[in-house]
């Protein structure tokens, strides 16, 4: 994940956008059943009230917090699941 993708994901995490949230919700559904989704400490820093299913989880392939990753417009799953 590039710096711009990370910043885009954080921007969309804090400044909710209906279109981005719809995409993020679809991605989150995929991530919740992914074997590379792992529980971390991110929920203490990134509580996610709209996508609670990924709250506190991160991708064990790229190590990105999922609450941010699923909201980054240009980001892709490292395993090509979305």
Image (tube, rainbow, N blue to C red):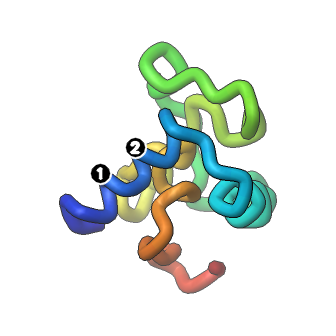
User: Circle 2 is placed at which residue position?
Assistant: 10
* Label 1 secondary element: helix
* Label 2 secondary element: helix
Q: Position of residue 11 (x, y in %)?
A: 40, 45
Q: Which mark is residue 38?
A: none
Residue sitting at x 47%, y 61%: 72
Q: Residue furthest bottom?
A: 80
User: Circle 1 is placed at which residue position?
Assistant: 7
Q: Nearer the viewer, residue 13 or 27?
A: 13
Q: Position of residue 77 (x, y in %)?
A: 51, 74
Q: Residue furthest left?
A: 3
Residue sitting at x 77%, y 60%: 22
Residue sitting at x 46%, y 27%: 42
Contact between labelled residues 1 and 2, with CB atoms less than 8 Å apart: yes
Q: CA distance from mark 2 to mark 1?
A: 5 Å
Whether residue 30 is visible to the viewer of this picture, yes or no, is no
- How many residues crowd mark 2 within 10 Å: few (<14), some (14–19), many (20+)? some
């Amino acid at each position: 994940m590039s710096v711009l993708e990370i910043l885009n994901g954080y921007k969309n995490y804090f400044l909710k956008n209906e279109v981005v949230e719809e995409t993020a919700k679809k991605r989150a559904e995929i991530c919740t059943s992914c074997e590379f989704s792992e529980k971390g400490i991110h929920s203490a820093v990134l509580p996610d009230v709209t996508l609670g299913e990924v709250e506190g989880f991160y991708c064990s392939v790229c190590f990105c917090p999922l609450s941010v990753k699923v909201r980054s417009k240009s980001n892709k799953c490292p395993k090509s699941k979305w």
